[in-house]
Image (tube, grey):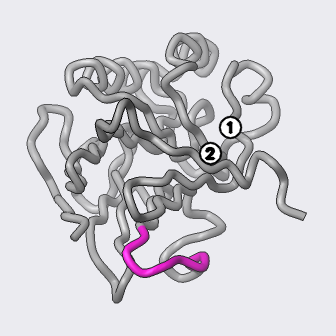
Amino acid sequence: MIEEAESNLIKLFIGGREMKLFFLSDIHGSVYYAKKALDIFQKEGADYLILLGDQLYHGARNPLPREYNPKELAALLNQMKDKIIAIRGNCDSEVDEMVLVYPIMATYSNILYYNRRLFITHGHLYNENNLPELCKGDVFVYGHTHIPVAKKEGDIYIMNPGSITFPKEDSPNSYAILEDNLFKIKDLEGNIFKELLLE
């Protein structure tokens, strides 16, 4: 049986206007990078903040990030509770959800975006080697690898915003925006690192 939290279906429109979505992954407890990301979220004028997992804990395989403070980070993110759509990463736990005032324990969520589905997940269960059942034109959005991805594979679009805190493979600290059918992965200065047009 699919848990109710895992079958969320969210339709994001305001008065016929498409919403601007902001994607962030793998904060790993860094208040320093979270503050930078939330400042950028405001400057971008985004409507929703999509958190792709690994929010409060640095993870046993990672070093302590800059300004590591899960308690302060939870308070910071809780201020944005009405704007956040979040899913669980492999470093997230039920204890984390006890200090956050928005749900984080869903393995995945679906967002309806015009005539397509955005399947959002962390990437440790569903990933490019284990895709869920998707329709032509759908978008698979994940984090976990800390490597930005923006590509089309067959009939499916695949997008990963990279990590705001621990980028890998010489990629920048990054986030992504979806607006007007265009994904843009940007560094902290707003420079476009990768982009993906949903045709």
Image: 32 above or below 103: above
Dominant SS in magenta:
loop
Residue ranking furthest to the front: 15
Check whether the beta carbons of the residues at disc 1 and disc 2 lie within 8 A of each other: yes
Residue 147 x %, y %: 34, 60
Quadrant assignment, res 122: bottom right
Residue extent of the magenta highlight: 131-138
Residue 54 falls inside the magenta stretch: no
The residue under label 1 is 104
Q: Residues within 10 Å of mark 2 (few under 14, many from 20)?
A: many
- Disc 2 marks which amino acid? Ile
121 relative position to 168: left or right: right
Name the residue at 68% across, 21% down.
100
Residue 160 x %, y %: 37, 59
Quadrant where the C terminus sits is: bottom left
182 relative position to 3: left or right: left
Res. 158 visible in picture: yes
Q: Residues within 10 Å of mark 1 (few under 14, many from 20)?
A: many
Residue 115 x %, y %: 40, 63
Q: Which mark is residue 87?
A: 2
- Disc 1 marks which amino acid? Ile
Residue 75 x %, y %: 59, 11
Residue ranking furthest to the left: 191
Q: Relative to the observer, which residue lies in front, 173 or 39?
A: 39
Quadrant where the N terminus sits is: bottom right
Name the residue at 28% across, 62% down.
169
